[in-house]
Image: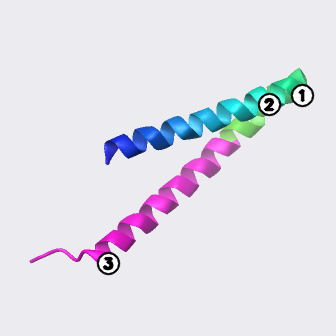
């Protein structure tokens, strides 16, 4: 379970890094704007989306495999 979290985290950071590099190729001012405003917003939205997806997955698993009492 922990290895999938590491892979997801690396993928997210790789995507953020590639988008920043692309924006830096466009102009340096947009890169600065992204670092100050876009990056925190992207991290918040991404974190919310990932946590929501994890909750949905855990709920689906708990319904698919009910605990044995």
Reading the image, the residue beneath label 1 is 26
Q: Earlier in the sequence, mark 1 or mark 3?
A: 1
> Contact, CB < 8 Å: mark 1 with mark 2?
yes
Q: Position of residue 3 (x, y in %)?
A: 35, 41
Query: Per the image, is 45 magenta?
Result: yes
**Which secondary structure is most common in the magenta stretch?**
helix
Whether 11 is drawn above or below 23: the answer is: below
> Mark 3 = which residue?
63
Classify mark 1: residues with Cα within 10 Å, few (<14), some (14-19) or many (20+).
few
Residue 59: image location, x then y, percent = 37, 71
User: Which picture quadrant has residue 21?
Assistant: top right
Looking at this view, name the residue that lies furthest to the top: 28
Of residues 53 and 32, the one drawn nearer to the viewer in this rendering: 53
Distance from disc 1 to disc 2, alpha carbons, whole Å, reads 7 Å
Element assignment for label 2: helix
Q: Say which residue label 2 marks.
A: 22
Q: Secondary structure at mark 3?
A: helix
Say the numbered circle drawn on residue 42. Answer: none
Label 3 or label 2, whichever comes before in sequence order: 2
Residue shown at 51% from the left, 61% from the top: 52
Task: Give the residue at x 57% y 40%.
Answer: 12
Q: Quadrant of residue 18?
A: top right
Residue 28's quadrant in the figure? top right
Q: Which residues are magenta?
A: 41-69
For residue 56: magenta? yes
């Amino acid at each position: 379970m922990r290895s999938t979290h590491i892979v997801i985290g690396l993928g997210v950071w790789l995507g953020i890094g590639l988008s920043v590099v692309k924006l830096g190729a466009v102009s340096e001012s947009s890169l600065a704007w992204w670092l100050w405003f876009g990056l925190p917003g992207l991290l918040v939205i991404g974190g919310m989306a990932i946590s929501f997806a994890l909750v949905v997955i855990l709920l689906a698993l708990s319904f698919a495999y009910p605990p044995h009492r």
